[in-house]
Every structure is written in C-alpha cells, then in structure tokens.
Amino acid sequence: MIVNDFKPVVNKHMLVFAHLKSSHFSPIINYIKICMYQMSVSMDNQQNIAKLKDIPDCDILVLPEMWNCPYHNDALKAAYLRHDESLEALKETARTNKIWIVAGSICTNKYNRCYILNSDGDIVCSYDKTHLFEFHNKQDYCENEVFVPGNHLQCFDTPWGKCGILLCYDIRFPEVSRILAQNGAQILFCPAAFNEQATKKHWKLFTQTRALENEVFLCGVAPAKYTYKNYTSGGHSILVDGFGNIVVELGEEETCKVVDIDLNDIDKVRKRMPYWKVRRNDLYELKEIKNEDNSNQ
C-alpha cells in the first residue's frame, strides 16, 4: 500500500486493463487509488463546492458526511436547499476528473443521503443513513429532528470490485457491516462526522473492529476540525486493512491523502484467518430484510 501527497503517480492499471480487454474478459482491476478528502466545512456552500476543483490523481474520491453544511441541526434544517447545486458540482467533478465519487452525504428534503457517482458523472446508486444519531446528556441531540431513517442497505459494483457504504452512526451497529461483507463488499466506505469527543474515544476503535471482524478494507472519511455553535468535528480520517491495521490516519487539519490499496490483500487475509469458513451458520443467521419499501437502487 502506497500513500501519496498530490504527486503524479504512474497508472499501474493500464497494462492489466489492456491485457484483460484483449482477452475478452470483463476487467476487474485489483489496485485502486483512494483519495480521502478531509475537508473543512463552511456555511458558505460556494466555498465548499470550490474545494472540489482541485482533486489529485485518484480512482475514487471519498468525501465526509455533510461536506456541504456544518453538522448542526440549526444548519441542517435548511441544508436541503443546497442539494441541487451540490449534486451538480459532484457530477461535474466526476466527469472532469474521470473518477468515481463516494460523495460523503448531503441533505435531501428528509434524508441524510450518500450518492455514488461513476467517472461519467452518472449516479450509480444512493444510500440514506439508516441509523440516526441520538445522544442524551447535559445537551440532548437527536438527528431525527431533521431526518428520517433510510430503509435499505447498499453495496455497489465498481471496476475494482464490490464496495459497501455506511454513514457515521451506522458503524456502531455491527449488523450493517456484516451484511455488506456477506453481500460481497471488499471495501466499506464510511463518511462520518463524529464530534471531537467521540472521535477521540470511539472512532478508531469502531473502524478497526469493523474492518477486522469482516476482513475488509474500511475507509472512514471525516471533516477536518471546525466548530459551528456547540459542535466541533474531530478529523482523523482513517483507512484500515482486513487485519485491523491502520494504513493511514490523518490529523485534524484539512488535507487530501491518496492511498494505493491492493484488493488481493483481502483474499490473503481470509485464507490466513478463515473466519468466513469457520462461522457456524447452523447455529445463527444474519440476513437483510427486504420489502417493497426498500428502494435498493
């Protein structure tokens, strides 16, 4: 795995792709360059959008949860007004840079939604956060004052392999990650906006645990440290491998980090530590419940 800071990198995929294409096989490329954009978020959405103009060379760009609006209910209640201009900016960024985007999340009229865009700027699928954050202490906070929960889980296929998507608080529920892994995901993307205190106490613990117990890469991207009213974000975006090892952990400042990973590493981990073979499916079962309301796009 290689970490890059904005330096041009020779595309190792070209020869592999050409060989597979000439052999009449559907090309599955195992090396992938992930750009983790730990963005500082502003109330001025034009400032947020402007930061999408200068993206380093990568295959997939990953943005934080609510990259276009401070994560506070007072701001989120009107954030749906930013939806259309933010989505158009994402499409243009994908088309211009010929990259896929795991688009953090933006506010629709009632959902905390992550769009997945391909390199043509088309929406491949979307995922609405299924577990809404709720916390009761000296100051209560309930995300359901702004959003309603989504009703489906989401994997998606890419030229490099199958991926799954979580949003922030979802990572505290192990069933979600396990079902996505059962459905074939080799990378779990988790755009998040943990506050500063939760980042210090829980963020690294959850990301390493979910990666280790499912033997997948987990890429968690958070906003850079900023404060809006009584909310302060924690930064520390992180990429963890299938053994639970931290490949990259950022600090608190705004930055982009490009990381090369090899999805062949997942097969190596699972052969060395065969959780999936040893699991007792005769004793327990975990499955996704699908119904007519599951808008699995």
Image (cartoon, grey):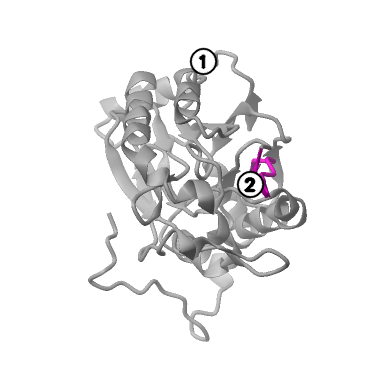
Q: Where are the magenta residues, as a range?
A: 227-241
Q: CA distance from mark 2 to mark 1?
A: 23 Å
Q: Compare residues 13 and 293 and report the one nearer the observer.
A: 293
Check disc 2: other Cα within 10 Å, few if <14, some if 14-19, many if 20+. Answer: many
Above or below, comparing residue 182 to residue 76 in the picture: below
| Residue 27 horizontal side relative to residue 256, left or right | left
- Number of marks in picture: 2
Q: Is residue 177 left or right of residue 195?
A: left
> Is 38 located above or below residue 191 in the figure?
above
Secondary structure of residue under mark 2: loop
Which residue is at the front of the view, 22 or 288? 288
| Residue 219: quadrant of the picture | top right
Instruction: Pick whichever, 263 or 166, lies toward us.
Output: 166
Vertical arrangement, residue 232 with respect to residue 51, above or below: below
Identity, as a three-letter code, of the amino acid under mark 1: Val
260 falls in the magenta region: no
Residue 241: mark: 2
Left/right placement of residue 151 relative to residue 53 reads: left
Q: Position of residue 178 (x, y in %)?
A: 51, 65
Amino acid type at circle 2 is Asp
Instruction: Describe residue 188's horizontal placement relative to residue 135 as left or right.
Output: left
Residue 70: x and y in percent read 55, 42
Q: Measured from the top left, where is residue 171 in percent x and y?
A: 57, 59
- Residue 8 x, y percent position in the rendering: 55, 13
Q: Secondary structure at mark 1?
A: loop
Q: Tell me which residue sits at (68%, 63%) in the image.
A: 139
Q: Which residue is mark 1?
A: 10
Q: Is residue 237 visible?
A: yes
**Residue farthest to the bottom, as pictured:** 283
> At 35% across and 46% down in the image, what residue appears?
157
